[in-house]
Every structure is written in structure tokens, then in C-alpha cells.
Amino acid sequence: MVGATQPAGREHLVDAQTASVAGAGYRAAYVALAATIVAGTAFAPVNSGAVALAHFLGGHVLNDRAIAMRLGSETFTAPGSYSGGIGWLGAVANELLARAGHGYALFATMLAALVAFAFVELRARRAGGRWLALGAVVLAGSCAPGSLGIAGGITTAAFAAVLAYVLERPSRTAAIVATVLAVVWCNVAAEGLLAPAIAACFAAATTLRGGTGDERRWSRFACLGTALALLATPAFLSYPLYALGTLRLDRDLFGVVAYHPIDVAPLAYRVGFTAMVLAGLALGLQRDRGASIPLFAAAAILALMNGAFVIVFGVLAAPVLAASAAAAYPYFDKLSTGSLRGDIASGVAAVALAAGLVAVAAAPATAPGYALAASLASDGRSHRVFCYDVDWCDVAISGAPLVSVFADGRVAAYPSTVLSRQRDIVAMKNHWRSAIERYKVDTMILRNDRPLTTMISMAPGWSVVASDSAASVFERAALR
């Protein structure tokens, strides 16, 4: 009896030691991953155009105690054009953080990143266990380069990740929470338009996997609630149309804004998006009767339509791949690691690290091109500005009313004729010189490596007054 008991006891001790080592490895990986996310956010470049536009819009809301629904004197091509006040709440939040100091804005961005990836991990853990959940976070993180900075796409990813977690298990509470979350998201940004689309994907998944009658009913109520949330903004019925234009999915914007993944998020597209697609092909997406296919496909198409949404593809699709891996390799789901106490400790450590990095991180320099646009109003003279990259003009309009622009990043608010003339000037087509004359453009911020820059540099009356590594500012003396 003793001889039979000892081997069993030793085997149990070995299993306990193995589990302890696995648990320690898991916690170390968890902390290292959280630290990487925080550090990556701390040193990511700021989205200068989005920050400047938030400063302009949020400042007006706070100062005027009203939401501007139309373009003003900051543009000379479309003053009075309806803009719908899209993203007013996000602009106010960004402006308040900016007024508090760069550190506050950076800390809020770090928290958004931690929330996004935490909910990726929680969704993946439900279906694949803790180890595969960590793998899902790594995959999603590979889609993050280019989106982690202040006013970057990580805020959109956080909303999408939380909404997906809520919708994944349909219930009355989930439908209510999803609706409230969608209302907030729609007022924060145009990307709130994605909420009913995400809800529809989960409703389709519930039907495909054969969910109960209650689950199917509440998933449809969630679709209805998130769709009605589109009307809960100052723009009301106009929100869907103007939000869709703000998402920059329209092919007619070619030549006006960048949206190709290879241009917008080259590293995330080459590494993260490719890895996600290859993993999907390798693991298959037929788990739960193919219920995950609608979400994976819709998120992938969205990322291809605008590279800014590669991060959204990452946070939505990575847990799907974890579930597929768990179905293919059940061993991972059986690994017992970690605990709620350890998760909380790791989260606290990540937040503490974020606070520490904020204390030592310096405010980043304004990106080339944007810095030139920011300096236009410093000479005290009026400028009628054309920007090769309309997002540069998001910075220039901070000098209004001295500075007014041909077009800025609020492309949904500008008439199609203005955007068409923007394309014509950039491509030097269809009487582009006469368009410059008609609108009395006297200042142009142009990319250094484009043919238009060469043409303007040789044109009579135009001269370079400033330049950096990305762009040059040309002024026309005749109009001065």
C-alpha cells in the first residue's frame, strides 16, 4: 500500500510543480505584454491632425457653450456648409485633456489601450483559455502600430472591443449596455456608426450557431438599440450620412485623403493584418457552425477599405482565432494558469507603469507638415491656404479667422465640387491653375516629392517661405 501511494504522491507533486511553473510563466508573460502595450503607447507618435481638429472643435464648444453644426470662416470654399457636429463629445474630451496637460492626454490614451487589449483577452479566454488568450492579445497588438498615439485609432479599438465583449453573450442586460455604449460612441466619434454593424455580425453569429430563442431575440434587440443610437446625436437623422463620409471609406476620396492600408498603417498591414489572415486560413473559421465568419469577414473588409481600421480588425478577430485554435488544439484550453488575484495585480502594475512613464515622457514634437501649418498665423497676416494633405489644414484652421483653408480633414462636410477641385489641383488636371486663381489662394503647403511642388516653384510670383523634411510652404507675392 505504501509503495503504491508514494508514486501517486510523487506524480501529484510533479503535476503541482508543473502547474506552478506554468502559472509563473503565464503571469510573467501577462505583465510583459501589458508593459509592452503601455510603453508602445507612451512613445507612439501623436495623430497631429486629429488633435488639432479636436482642439478647434472642442475649444469652440467649451467657449461658445454650443455645438457648431456648420463650417465657419475657417474655410473660404464652403462657409456655412453643414457638418453635423460629428464627434463633438470626443473633441471636448480631448480639449479638456489637452488643457490639463500632455501627461493627462497620454495617460488617458494608455488606459484606452489597456482597456482594448484587456477585453480582447477576456473574449479570447472565454473560448480558448488563458494561454490562447495571451496569443490573441499578441496578434491584436501586431495590428496596433500606427494607432497607439494620442487621438489615434486605439480609442475606436477600445469601444469596439468592449462592445464585442458585451454582445458575445446575448441577454437583456447586454442589449441595454450595448445601446448605452453605442450612444456614447456615436457622440464621441463618427466611428460609432460601426456599432450596429458589429451588433448585426453577432446577431448573425447567434443564429448560425443555433442559439436559444431568448439569445436570438436579445441579439436582435441589441441590433435595434445600437441602430437607434445613431439618432441620439446633435446631427439626428444626418448622423449616419455624415459619419459615413467621415470614416473615409468612399472611393471618391482618392487623391484627397489617404486610406489605403499600405499608406495609412504600413507596418500593421504588412505584419498584423497578414498574420491574422494567415492564422484564419490555417485554423479555419468553422467552429460553432461558421458563426464567427460574419464578424471576421466584415472586420477584414473594413480594414481593407481604410487602413486606419486595421487595429479594429485586430481586436475583433483575434478572439475568433483563439476560439478556432482551441477547437483545433484542446490541450491549451486545459492548461490551468493564473487567477483573478493575479490578473488584478498585473492590471494595477500596468497602470502604475503608465503613470510612471507619463511622469518622464516629454511632449512629442509636431510632425513635419503639421508644424508648418501651425506656424502660418504667427506672422499676423491673413492666409488663404491650400494643403496638399487636407489633414495638415486641420492644424492651420487654429489660426482662424486670419487663416482660412481650401479644405480640411472634415471631408464629409465639404461639397463634392470642392473635393473634386482639391483632386484636380493635386493631380494638375482640369484647369487647376484657374481654380487657384478663382479662390484667390495665396499660400500652399505642398509635399516636397510631388510634381505639383515643382510646378508651383517655377510659377511666377510664388516663392518658398518655409520647409521641412515633408513639405514646403509657398506664398504668392502678387496677392500680398
Image (cartoon, rainbow, N blue to C red):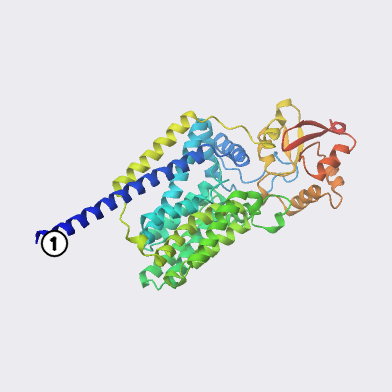
- At x 62% / y 55%, what residue is drawn? 306
Q: Where does the image place residue 154, in percent across and percent down from the top left?
A: 52, 47
Q: Where does the image place residue 259, in percent across and percent down from the top left?
A: 65, 52
Image-based side of 382 in relation to 230, left or right? right
Q: Where does the image place residue 76, in percent across and percent down from the top left?
A: 75, 41
Q: The N terminus appears in which quarter of the rendering?
A: bottom left
Q: Where does the image place residue 12, in percent across and percent down from the top left?
A: 21, 56
Q: Nearer the viewer, residue 397 or 349?
A: 349
Q: Nearer the viewer, residue 99 or 322?
A: 322
Q: Residue furthest top?
A: 379
Q: Is residue 236 visible?
A: no
Q: Nearer the viewer, residue 5 or 466?
A: 5
- At x 48% / y 29%, what residue is drawn? 360
SS for dot 1: helix
Q: How many marks?
A: 1
Q: Residues within 10 Å of mark 1 (few under 14, many from 20)?
A: few
Q: The C terminus appears in which quarter of the rendering?
A: top right
Q: Is residue 292 above or below residue 369?
A: below
Q: Residue furthest front?
A: 3
| Residue 373, image quadrant | top right
| Residue 73, image quadrant | top right
Q: Is residue 103 visible?
A: yes
Query: Which amino acid type is marked by label 1?
Result: Ala
Q: Residue furthest left?
A: 1
Image-based side of 27 in relation to 14, left or right? right
Q: Is residue 388 above or below residue 335?
A: above
| Residue 125, image quadrant | bottom left
Image-based side of 9 in relation to 237, left or right? left
Q: Is residue 337 above or below residue 456?
A: below
Residue at the spot of label 1 = 4
